[in-house]
Image (tube, rainbow, N blue to C red):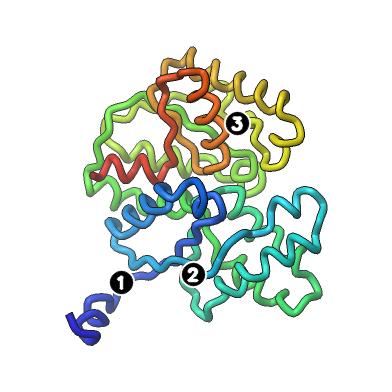
Amino acid sequence: MDTGEAIADHVGVPTVVLFPTCLGDVVARQTVTDAELVLVRLGFDVRQARGATCCGQPAFNSGHDGPARAVARATLRALDDGTDDPILVPSGSCASMVRLHWREVFHKTDDADGALRIAKRVRELSSFLAEQSATIASLQPQLTARVGYHDSCHMLRELRIKEAPRDVLRAINGIELIELPSAERCCGFGGTFSGRYPEVSVAMADSKIQDMVDARIDLLVSADPGCLLQLGGRMSREGSPVRTLHLASVLAEALA
């Protein structure tokens, strides 16, 4: 295919930018791959955010604004590409950082305007997918499972996103969505929190895992890789048969 044909094929196709985040780059590459696969199936042209690394959240949450700014600057400049294409983030915590806190981190700096531009474009992935629920349903995704959903703290309390990921799960044929009593309770990860207070972190995870055992779910879903890393890792050590998957991976599997 020559260049002219390639351009013609993409005329009229909406474009989105996928920002993998640190965990997506390091430990959750499958989540990023699945997110891209799903978006392409839904009719979007997907551009990976090349050169974007960390949003600066770990340093920011520890009170180190300067280091957070230094880390996030490269990501800001990689994302500020001169387009209005939506920037999709498969992590509620990272989406919250960029959308809500970058304006504070970059206040009165040369990157202040860029931070505001990016904040307006950033969308947490599940909220974007929920807007495509009719298209998702038309593709007849199928996955038979009892599913519990975990709300991540930043996504629920800062971005105020609760129903969107559940709406996406309801669009999948065969899924029985089980509301967990502890769905809104913290998993204990909290980034650096889990390293500083490991005993408390493990106790918080174990409390949620017991709820999953009692609910007899097959699959735990979340839209935050950090939460899945925490809960999935703990369940693996305890020999639990419950699978943990990002929402994007559930949808990719259901569409396969």
Tag 2 secondary structure: loop
The residue carrying mark 2 is 50
Which residue is nearer to you in this view: 20 or 104? 20
- As measured in the structure, the alpha-carbon distance from the residue carrying label 2 to the one carrying label 1 is 21 Å
| Residue shown at 75% from the left, 54% from the top | 60
Q: Where residue 186 sits in the image (x, y, percent)?
A: 64, 31
Residue 58's place in the image compared with 199, above or below, is below
Question: What amino acid is labelled 3 in the image?
Answer: Glu
| Residue shown at 30% from the left, 72% from the top | 13
Badge 1 density bin: few <14, some 14–19, many ≥20, Cα 10 Å: few
Q: Where residue 160 sits in the image (x, y, percent)?
A: 61, 45
- The numbered mark, 3 or 1, whose residue comes first in the sequence reads 1
Q: Where residue 86 sits in the image (x, y, percent)?
A: 48, 66
Contact, CB < 8 Å: mark 2 with mark 1?
no
Residue 184 - label: 3
> Is residue 35 found left or right of 114 in the rendered image?
left
